[in-house]
Amino acid sequence: MTDPKTRQFILDHHGDDPHALALHARRFPDIDMAFAVEQIAGWQKAKGKLPSWAACNDIVYPAHLALEQCSSETTALYKARLCQRLLGTGAPETASGVMADLTGGMGVDFSFLAPLFQRAIYIERQPALCQCARHNFQALQLEQAEVWEGDSMQQLEHLPNLQLLFIDPARRDKNGLRTHAIGDCSPDILPVLPELLDKANFLMIKLSPMLDWHETVRSLEAVCPNCVGEVHLVATANECKELLVILSRHDGNRTVRICCANDDDLFITDTATEQTSAPLPVVGDAEEAMAASWLYEPNAAVMKAGCFSTLTQRFPVRALSANSHLFLSDTRLDGFPGRELRILRSSTMNKRQLQACLGDIRQANITVRNFPLSVAELRKRLHIADGGDIYIFASTVAKRDHLIFVCNKA
């Protein structure tokens, strides 16, 4: 998509500061510097986010916004593995069937899903993104890829029967503000949901993790009852990145599978289990809390799912309080989906007890949950700097006792 000199310049200056190169553009009159700077900045972003794309020297990176909003390689691979399980497909060399991506964008998710199919259709209304996609899919050797330019909602009638239909509605409105409901995303899929489900065996919707998954399921099933089969809360490095919803035509009542994925850590439950779970077992008082030896903090995906009662059914833990989302145990547990920390000492907020508990600690990582002070306020009161390998958790027990737990990682 550019001349050989500019392409070589990009390869030679991958590690250089794009802004500094732009300032010295006059030194390179034969180079399309605007394009080169954009590509170098894109490669530097992709190196961490999309390593397999960055390893391909012929990739062309689109404008900054598309790269910023695209999936990471980790989350794209998760979708590919999920797709393999749903469809019962094996290795790419056994690919069959057809899939379509209605909101192609940069094409990252598409590029990881496409090899699982004999034919893969990418639909995007922005000509510049379509041009990049045609080039990049060829560079990635995705021979099954087809690029359709246009409005995907107008292309629905031209699509064949599909094994998978993927859609990633924009999470911002026309004014650039974040949306908080599936009906506010663009395109709004609720009016065409029956048509989408008629087109494919499975519909995979990628949404912002800011959306409430309970409300999302209610909105979808208000249009097509019992259509939701699975909900996936996908996190990487303990940061929730995506909400994935899997839909299909279904007759009769359906239990929704809830999958909380944080890198390789997977916690699975379902709506039936959640609805029949016993009340959350909560620590009774400060004395009981301060006798515990281990503190557990669920990972970001479990926190977003909110399936805390199921956690206490599967692991012998007690909630520090109903709203703290921290859990205590007398013994070390295997397989808990989150951080495990050994409690070294604990204390009330009594000044004398605090002094004895903190000892000579001058640096620590502080977390507050259901506590009257912010992290900054507590750090100032305790005279403790940020960082180090000590972790202090501050929370409230039995609605009145404010406690701190001094911990380290197991």
Image (cartoon, grey):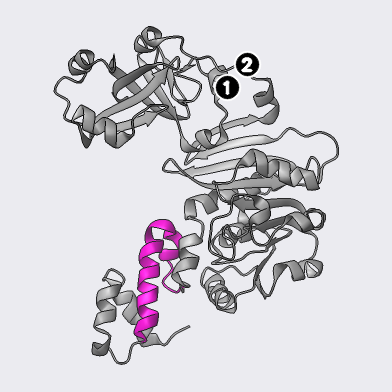
Q: Do the CB atoms of the residues marked 1 and 2 lie less than 8 Å apart?
A: yes
Within 10 Å of disc 2 (Cα), the crowding (few <14, some 14-19, many 20+) is few
Residue 142's x, y, as percent? 59, 67
Query: Does dot 1 land on a helix, a strand or a loop?
Result: helix
Residue 365 seen? no
Q: Quadrant of the C terminus?
A: top left
Q: Position of residue 229 (x, y in %)?
A: 72, 40
Separation of marks 1 and 2 at Cα, in angstroms:
7 Å
Mark identifier at residue 278? 2
- Which mark is first along the chain, 2 or 1? 2
| Image quadrant where residue 238 sits | top left
Relative depth, front residue between 62 and 138: 62
Residue 331 is left or right of residue 129, and the answer is left
What amino acid type is highlighted by mark number 1? Ser
Q: What residue is pinned by disc 1?
A: 309
Q: Which residues are magenta?
A: 32-59
Q: Is residue 286 above or below residue 164?
A: above
- The x and y percentages for residue 171 are 57, 57
Which of 400/383 is in front? Answer: 400
Q: Nearer the viewer, residue 89 or 213?
A: 213
Looking at the image, residue 59 lies above or below residue 264: below
Residue pictured at 68% horizontal, 49% vertical: 89
On whether residue 90 falls in the magenta region, the answer is: no
Q: Residue at x 70, y 72 (%)?
A: 151
Does the image show residue 101? Answer: yes
Residue 358 in the image: above or below residue 201: above
Q: Amino acid at mark 2?
A: Ala
